[in-house]
Image (tube, helix red, strand yellow):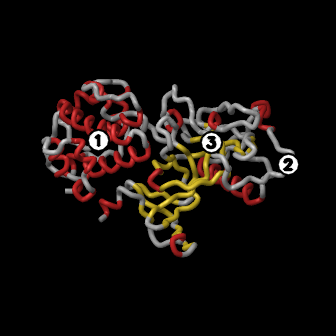
Amino acid sequence: SREEDSTEAVPVGEPLKVTGKGKKQRRHYLSFEYEGNTFELEDPVLLTPEQQKEKPYVAIIKDITENDGSLSVTGQWFYRPEEADKKGGGNWTASDTRELFYSFHIDDVPAESVMHKCVVHFIPLNKQIPSRKEHPGFIVQKVYDTVAKKLWNLTDKDYEDNKQHEIDLLVKKTVDRIGQLPDREPIDVPADSTDQFSNKRGLRKRPPNPLDVSRDTTGKPEQFIKAETPGSDNLKHYAILAKYKAVTNATYRDKWLDKLVDTIPLTSKEGAEASHADAGSVAKISNSSSSARDPSSSDNENSYPPDVVVSIMASLERSTYDALHADFQKYNQKMRKLEFNIKNSPVLRRRLMNKELDPPVLLTMSPDELKV
């Protein structure tokens, strides 16, 4: 059924081509759907990181393949300056908080690890960086060689021809999207932009030892994705969660807890008062566009007091975390499926809110049981 498909990534249309035979046969597609969104070849996207303390990965989708019922995407990866190792040790310092390095590193990941699309501007060093307000998005001006651990400018012309052509197209896409940018004063060009090799550039498809992309998380965990997804690092129901002492202070856990609470219709008066308790950030969040469903719009079910909803959903999230905290990806996948099923099943919502189901029991229920 379509409901079941929405919890997993599914290809769209007929394959563009089929490669391999037997168990190695792969079907290649132009696009796929996941959680109501469609992703296509050449889309820049954010991906769920392997470790919960890491920022989302960023890549361009280069291939979408199905093998033995499993859908994967091949991503061409970006690196943040502070995550990219220098040959002589240390890391680079970002010249702009939105800066990314492009790379020719290719890797495959499950299609379900794609979070959402983002915007990446490819800007030659001699051009002015576009205004964050007018053109939000990541900025790329350099290419990171993952093998030799050095940087190259987008406008260096000594790449292998196919790689240079690829970069030229990405720069052209940016110009087509935001228009020609004014020239930058020569004195503004960063000093380390002259970093070059004396040997021929032969970039391998995959580095033999993947770089450690862990990072210091003392800053705001969502800093890098603010420009691409305004409000994505805020919580719609933060005031309610705080009021009933359910905030965990772990960004990724609070995000899922907030989504769970959003699946249940709240008693309007108390819900409204709690939602506007914080006149600053929460008021801003309530005015921002949200993809969250308005539960009361699809059926005439009862609404519930926020304290009851928060208590039940906090118990459900805590049980999931206790069971799966050692595997961040499995935790994320389980939370996605729980949110989807609760959001789309009035019967499940009623049983949960009327305490006919103990929240931890949902972890052991089959997909068919969750749908009833």
Is the C-beta separation of discs 2 and 1 under 8 Å? no
Secondary structure category for the residue under label 1: helix
Secondary structure category for the residue under label 2: loop
Instruction: Give the percent coordinates (x, y) of residue 161.
Output: 77, 59
List the residue tagged with mark 1: 260
Question: Residue 290 appears in which quarter of the rendering?
Answer: top left
Q: What amino acid type is highlighted by mark number 2?
A: Asn
Task: Decide: is 1 above or below 232.
Answer: below
> Which badge, 2 or 3, comes first in the chain's sequence?
3
Instruction: Give the percent coordinates (x, y) of residue 281.
Output: 38, 27
The residue positioned 82% from the left and 42% from the top of the image is 196
List the residue tagged with mark 3: 79
* Frontmost residue, 298 versus 201: 201
Q: CA distance from mark 2 to mark 3?
A: 23 Å
**Image quarter of the C terminus:** bottom left
Dot 2: within a 10 Å radius of its alpha carbon, few (fewer than 14), some, or many (20 or more) residues?
A: few
Instruction: Give the percent coordinates (x, y) of residue 8.
Output: 39, 58
Q: What amino acid type is highlighted by mark number 3?
A: Tyr
Secondary structure category for the residue under label 3: strand
List the residue tagged with mark 2: 199
> Which badge, 3 or 1, comes first in the chain's sequence?
3
Task: Decide: is 23 above or below 370.
Answer: below
* Frontmost residue, 150 versus 122: 150
> Which badge, 2 or 1, comes first in the chain's sequence?
2
Does residue 257 appear left or right of residue 158 in this picture?
A: left
The residue positioned 51% from the left and 33% from the top of the image is 223
